Amino acid sequence: MTDAALTDRLRQLQRRVLSLAAPLSDAELRRQYHPDLSPLGWHVGHTIFTEDLWLHPQTLDAAEHALYQPQNSVKAGRGRRLPARAALLDETRERQRANIRLLQSPPETLAGHRLMRDGYLLKFLVQHHAQHIETMRMVLTQRQLALGAAHHRDGGGLERGAAVRRDCARIEAGAYQIGGRDNWSFDNELPRHRRRMKTFSIRRAAVTNAEYLGFIESGGYRNDAHWDADGLRWRRAAACAAPDGWLRGRGGWFEANCDGVRPLAPGAPVRGLSHYEARAFSRYAGARLPCEYEWETACAQNCLDDHGQAWEWCANAFHPYAGFRAFPYDEYSAAWFDGAHYTLRGASAFSEADCRRPSFRNFHTPGKRHIFAGLRLAFD
């Protein structure tokens, strides 16, 4: 993409940030709907703060650094520190426009910046905003759950589970290319390298809502044999019995997401699972989770029919590739190579196109369920 096209895309995403926030009241913009998610209004302020931080950091004051730098403020306290709704939205809109004008006619000091080479900074900001837009959709999903809007539904929901299918693609042993190709890639996708793997099989389709309902109906949340020791501890503490976002109505099962509440589609990939639940389902199915190299190889060979509807948990912890170099700043990836975060691949139905590529690596701790995540099965 040209710099002009990237600037246009950034402008589209700026507008999307505001459009997601505009229907909410001041109280709703400040409310923390989930312990792991910042208030929606904070994401509005953080996106414009990040633009300014890279384009003209001298304009930012200490109060903005204290609020919008994630390491400087706890999520639970961010809502009450936000500006009033009208001021937040109006000021964000004006600063967005000013930054677009700046990028359309950059001064020499900005045009010559090393991060502007090959459009890297524009690509970084586009992807940063895209990721926050998906997180804002997570906030809006939790808002729907807080409303409890599905419990009155009388019919049309998913009523019966299904057996697990085994339509697999076989990938022969060999050395396969792994990693990003260009400067769209984040540092954790690099360097591109060859990875030798054993023969494996992987499901062409992600695990579906109907298949997961079959797990529930079989007593999957009560059968300790499906759960490892960490999973058992998590299950007992979390006290959950269905994916995050699932609601039981009089007419079956429904799903809440940022667009409202709808009947669960039987053949759609399941979303709302922790890594522990994904592992338990894989044992129930006589399978395992794929490692992320297997997932990327199968995706590159067009063996995954429906990826991109739910993030897919992988078996391995998030880690640096050999030769990893932090860029454009140390904390983007390196802080999360702690053995406590697991990799997810693909994308969700609520991901923007800018982050949809086989090499993209998402990562979360294993108990997270609000992140639009499901799974795909692999077999040795």
Image: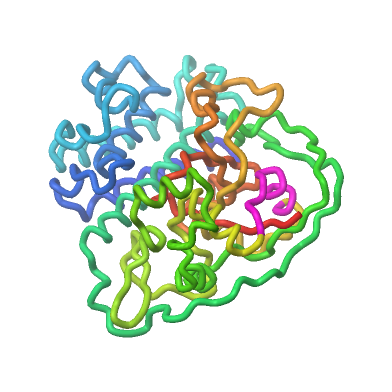
The answer to which quarter of the image holds residue 321 is top right
What residue range appears in magenta?
287-299
- Is any atom of residue 147 visible in this view? yes
219 left or right of 34 in image? right
Dominant secondary-structure state across the stretch colored magenta: helix
Q: Viewer-proximal residue, 104 or 156?
A: 156
x, y percentage for residue 46? Answer: 32, 33
x, y percentage for residue 155? Answer: 33, 85
The answer to which quarter of the image holds residue 10 is top left
Quarter in which the N terminus is drawn: top right
Q: Viewer-proximal residue, 96 or 371?
A: 371
Relative to 72, residue 27 above or below:
below
- Is any atom of residue 19 visible in this view? no
Residue at the bottom extreme, as displayed: 155
The answer to which quarter of the image holds residue 264 is bottom left
Examine the structure image and report whether residue 269 is included in the region drawn in magenta. Answer: no
Relative to 376, residue 208 above or below:
below
Labels in figure, total: 0
Identify the residue at horizontal 22%, vertical 41% (top origin).
Answer: 89
Identify the residue at horizontal 56%, vertical 56% (top origin).
Answer: 375
Identify the residue at horizontal 27%, vertical 26% (top origin).
Answer: 73
Identify the residue at horizontal 18%, vertical 34% (top origin).
Answer: 82
Examine the structure image and report whether residue 295 is included in the region drawn in magenta. Answer: yes
Q: Viewer-proximal residue, 331 or 10?
A: 331
274 left or right of 65 in image? right
What's the coloring here? Answer: rainbow
Quarter in which the C terminus is drawn: bottom right
x, y percentage for residue 135? Answer: 38, 46
x, y percentage for residue 323? Answer: 70, 22
19 left or right of 172 in image? left
